[in-house]
Structure formats: structure tokens, C-alpha cells
Amino acid sequence: MTRTIGPTVRAAVIGAGWYGAQNHIPTLAARPQVTLDGVSRLGAEELARVKDHFGFAFASQDYREVLARRPDVVVVSSPHHLHYEHACAAIAAGAHVLCEKPMTLDPAQAWDLVDRARARGVQLLLVNGYQYLPHLPALRAAIHDGEIGPIEHAMVSFISAPRDVFPGDRGLNSWQTTFFRPDKSTWQDPSKGGGFAWGQMSHAIPLLLWLTGLVPEEISAHAFRREVVDLAVSGSVTFRGGAVGSISGAAAMPQGNRGLMRLFLAGRDGMLTAEFDRDWCEIRRDDGTVRRLDVAEGEWIYHGRGPVDALVDLALGGDPSLNRSPGETGATSVGVIAALLASAGAGGAPQRIARAEAPR
């Protein structure tokens, strides 16, 4: 049974770095039901700055001291390779947890978090903001209700702007005005989840899986690398039930432009095209009907506020369907990315995805 809190929510943040201070904490602070109880990050000066600026009641460089205060919800926005340790401890403390993507760098650890959250009766969400944009539940319902029939082919491609992040020291231009600038090792060290696959396909793959309910089984992939990190990836996927598909992406979009996120689904009875960078979605059926979603200009511009708001609403007793980025999708995505990179490292040899589940 899901733990419910109310009427106020005591929130903690572990890893108050660039995006935590840019998105997660301001979104929490904007909710009148939320009390900013505890914050943790390394660096005494940086910690004091974030505590004083946002008005946290307590701050410590030791995340255990923050969790000892028994917060109701915890946002884990530490570097990728620390997600498992921090999320595991937050679940054990009985909190609902929102974890940055990628969920972990190890599929077994990702599924362990899912199993722990289920056993503890708490919600586990991932910071996958695309799923929280307007019209996404209706789009998902149309797919699951069979508007294009059983899916036979699925494709997702994401071209985003962090080419200046993965190699070199430039980074994103927008970082010049953010509260903190991230440590470049988070993006450039493969052992810590650096590179395009972990950093950016962890947006695209969960979107595909959550919308379709497809369960991936095997992938054969290749990657384009510069220095030690991948800048572009492409993979051919087989899904349970026989559907086939492709996932691809590149760090090639010039800075200042919206990321190109495109989704194509071919079914027995028609096809669906969703172009998030163009605020456009169309369903064409074999019976001649054409339906377009009424997406207003700018409605599909990406932001990360939706998962944070969902975390709070779930803690206040909201319907579990508010979780559009559940642990099952996050863990399956970790498995896909790990297999993708393993296949690319093996010259494209197919790799099985050990465990995968459709979101509940």
C-alpha cells in the first residue's frame, strides 16, 4: 500500500547541484503544501548557499543526517553513479522518491530499487519530464486502446544540444546563468555515466516504453565516439510479442534550439507520428481517418517540473496514475542502455536485456 502524507509534505533533496537548484528545488518551493526540510550536497560553501537561498530548515554534507529527519519525499539529484546508494537509503527511510535519470548505471541495482519501493509501499519516480507534458495521457490511452492496432514497429530518435558538454570544457551556454555549474566528470567520465546514451537516451527510451507498453528483449547497436564518450548511438531492438524497432540519437543540435524528439509507431491498423519539437502529433488509420492532437504551440517544450509536482501530489494521496515515470520504466531503460553500450563495444553483437517489465 502506498504511503500517504498530509496535509503538508516535508521534502529533502540529496545532491543539490545544477539541475536540482535550477528545477527541482524551485518547483518544490512553489508548492504551498511543501516544507523544505533538508538538503545535502558536497562543499560547505555551496551547501550553505543553497540552504540560505531556498530556506531549508537543515543542511548537511552527510545525506544520512538529512534522511534521519524522516522526510516524506526525497529528490535524488546526485551524480549518476550515486543514484543507487542515495535512492536505496531514501526508500529505506520510508520516503517517496524522485530519482534523476538514468536511474542507475547497473540494471540489477535499478530493479533492486523497484523491488525495495514495492516492498516499502512508497512511490518511485524518475525525472522524465516528457511524459508529463500536456496530452501525453491521452496519447498513451489511444495507443493502449488500439487506435493503430497492435504495434509492429516503433522508432524513437532524440537529437539534443549537449555536444559542448561531453568533450571539452565549454558546457552549455545556459549554465552561465544557473545557480551551479555541474562537475564535468558527471558528463565526461564513462564510469560515472558520461556520454550521450546515459545522459540523453535516458529521456527517449522511457518515453517510448511508457507510451507503448512495449517490453524490449534484445538490442544490436553501434556508437560514434569522440575521445572516450559516445556522441551518437543507434540500435535495432526486438520486443516481446514480435514487434521490432529502432532507437537512436546524437548530441548534434546547435545550442539554443529545442531538442528534436520524434516518435513513429506503425501498427496493424495505422500509424502514429509524434514530433515533440514541432508540437505536432497525427494518427492515420487504414480506414482513411486522420486525427491530430490539438497541441498548442509551445505546449511540448521540455521542462522538468511535472515529475516533481507528481511526487508531491502522490505523497498527498493522489492517484497512482499520476506517476508517469515509474520505476519499472526507469529500470527497463537502464537495461536497454547498458545492453546498447555493451553491443556497441562488441561491434554490434546482439545483447539480451536480462529483465524488463511494462509499467504498471
Image: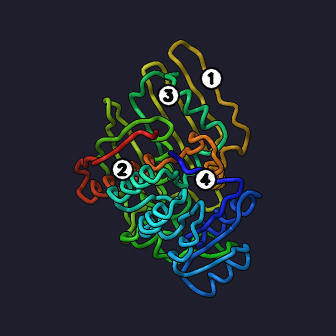
- x, y (%) of residue 292? 64, 27
Question: Which corner quadrant of the image does residue 318 belong to?
Answer: top right
Q: How would you rate the neighbour count of disc 2 (Cα within 10 Å): few for under 14, some for 14-19, many for 20 or more?
A: many
Label 3 is placed on what type of residue? His
Q: How would you rate the neighbour count of disc 1 (Cα within 10 Å): few for under 14, some for 14-19, many for 20 or more?
A: few
How far, Cα to Cα, is label 4 from label 1?
33 Å
Q: Which of marks 1 and 2 is in front?
A: 2
Judging depth in this view, the residue of 173 and 215 nearest the camera is 215
Residue topped by disc 1: 291
How far, Cα to Cα, is label 3 from label 2?
22 Å
Residue topped by disc 2: 336
Residue 311: image tag: 4
Judging depth in this view, the residue of 88 and 254 nearest the camera is 88
Specify whether residue 302 is in view: no
The image shows residue 277, relative to residue 145, as above or below, that is: below
Q: Which residue is drawn at 25% across and 49% down?
A: 351
Q: How would you rate the neighbour count of disc 3 (Cα within 10 Å): few for under 14, some for 14-19, many for 20 or more?
A: some
- Total labels drawn: 4
How far, Cα to Cα, is label 3 from label 4?
24 Å
The image shows residue 202, relative to residue 295, as above or below, that is: below
Residue topped by disc 3: 144
- Residues marked 1 and 3 touching at CB (< 8 Å): no
For marks 4 and 2, the one nearer the N-term is: 4
Label 1 is placed on what type of residue? Arg
For marks 1 and 2, the one nearer the N-term is: 1
- Residues marked 3 and 2 touching at CB (< 8 Å): no
